[in-house]
Amino acid sequence: MTKKLKIGLAGFGVVGQGLMDVLKKSPALDAEVLKICVKTRKERTLPENMFCYSADELINDDNINLIVELISDFEEAYHIVTSALKKGKHVVSANKKMIAENIAELIELQDKHGVSLLYEASACGSIPVIRNLEEYYDNDLLLSVTGILNGSSNYILSKIFDHNQGYAESLKEAQDLGFAEADPSFDVDGFDSLFKLIILTVHSFGTVVDPKEVLNYGISNISDFDIQFAKEKGYKIKLVAQVEKLAENKISLFVLPRLVRKDKYIYSVEDEFNGVVIKGLAYDKQFMFGKGAGGHPTGSAVLSDITAIGHDYKYEYKKKNYYPDFYYEQTGEIEIYLRYNKKEDLDKFNFINVSEEYAGPQFNYKIGMIKLKDLINIKDELRGMDIFIAVTRKTLNY
């Protein structure tokens, strides 16, 4: 350890309290939380003089050399992180939306001010996927990163497929356990997975992609018909994020539900766990698995970043700085299952071909190839339609 870390902690929710717990179990770490910024005054287990109510107190305190940002408000998180970097303080953050939407600026700020910004906890909870992509998969052999990146939606789907619960019941259970928010759309509509995928793409292929340009569609429209269809075919439905290397230094990425067979690694990823499959030219597939939600698992990832900063570690962004540029393209075709009720909704989908279809008194479906760009063009309409989409066993076709 090269220096004593004096921490200013922004946020004392589930993850913040989890961090404090795991810090107590790490006596070898030379770090101390000097002050904690919270929104409101209330009785807490820690002394009142440890708390403040403005993040600027942390940023302007010369005794603090590391800011740990663990709040949900992405605009306030942006203020805290950028202000701290400009002040020459190291930063650890878990705010995936803020990082994904501003990562180019954040990279520039830490370089300019000679400090480190680490954010392992922003991607897959307790799984050290960013550090591995930076250090182990730091060559041009990487082909794709595919995985379940959201513990909340995976918990819901596990209850549906393993315990025969309905979507509404499973969602409420996830909310009661703290895995899903009162407004669950960030998780179940695929936004959380999207922002994590954007971050992983930077460390996988060195490419900064605007989240608004990427297709994300979640599980909020899933119906009993879709669940029964998957079960009868021997599938589970999982919410899957994927970035894949294409020919000529191009990449493609998207977040969609997927019909998953038993022979796939992610088939057995259940409850609040995440699972990431990394595929390479020489090493084929490697699988990483761990808890993706909860105070202690996420707190352990934050602790790992704190320890790394104590050893003067920083991301080198090797793919971005030392390899040929990869470009994101909205090209290619995927095979999808589309369940629909209204013909006017079906008319919005330009199937290239159809391999299977069914028309019934209440539900209809088609399975066929469609251009990814055509789905991106209507992505803002998808959640408002009475439909459900899932990628079938065929994925990108180039």
Image (spheres, grey):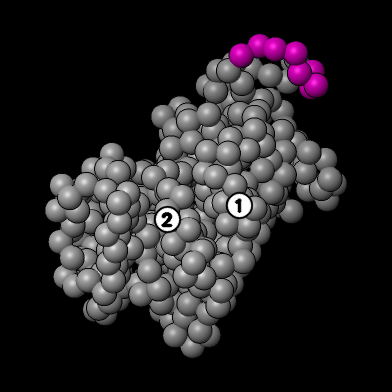
- Horizontally, residue 269 falls left or right of residue 199, namely right
For image coordinates 44% across by 85% down, the residue present is 281
The residue where tag 2 is placed is 226
Cα gap from disc 2 to disc 1, whole angstroms: 13 Å
- Horizontally, residue 98 falls left or right of residue 366, namely right
Q: Quadrant of the C terminus?
A: bottom left
Position in image of residue 4 (x %, y %): 73, 43
Between residue 295 and residue 339, name the one nearer to us. Answer: 339
Whether residue 40 is visible to the viewer of this picture, yes or no, is yes
Q: What is the count of numbered marks? A: 2
For image coordinates 56% across by 74% down, the residue present is 262
Secondary structure under tag 1 reads loop
Q: Residues within 10 Å of mark 2 (few under 14, many from 20)?
A: many
Between residue 243 and residue 156, name the one nearer to us. Answer: 156
**Vertical comparison of 308 with 172: above or below:** below
First-in-chain label (2 vs 1)? 1
Three-letter amino acid code at the position of disc 1: Asn
- Horizontally, residue 28 falls left or right of residue 84, namely right
The residue where tag 1 is placed is 164
Q: Residue furthest front?
A: 361
Magenta stretch: give its range: 40-47
Three-letter amino acid code at the position of disc 2: Asp
Position in image of residue 357 (x %, y %): 27, 67
Q: Residues within 10 Å of mark 1 (few under 14, many from 20)?
A: few
Secondary structure under tag 2 reads helix
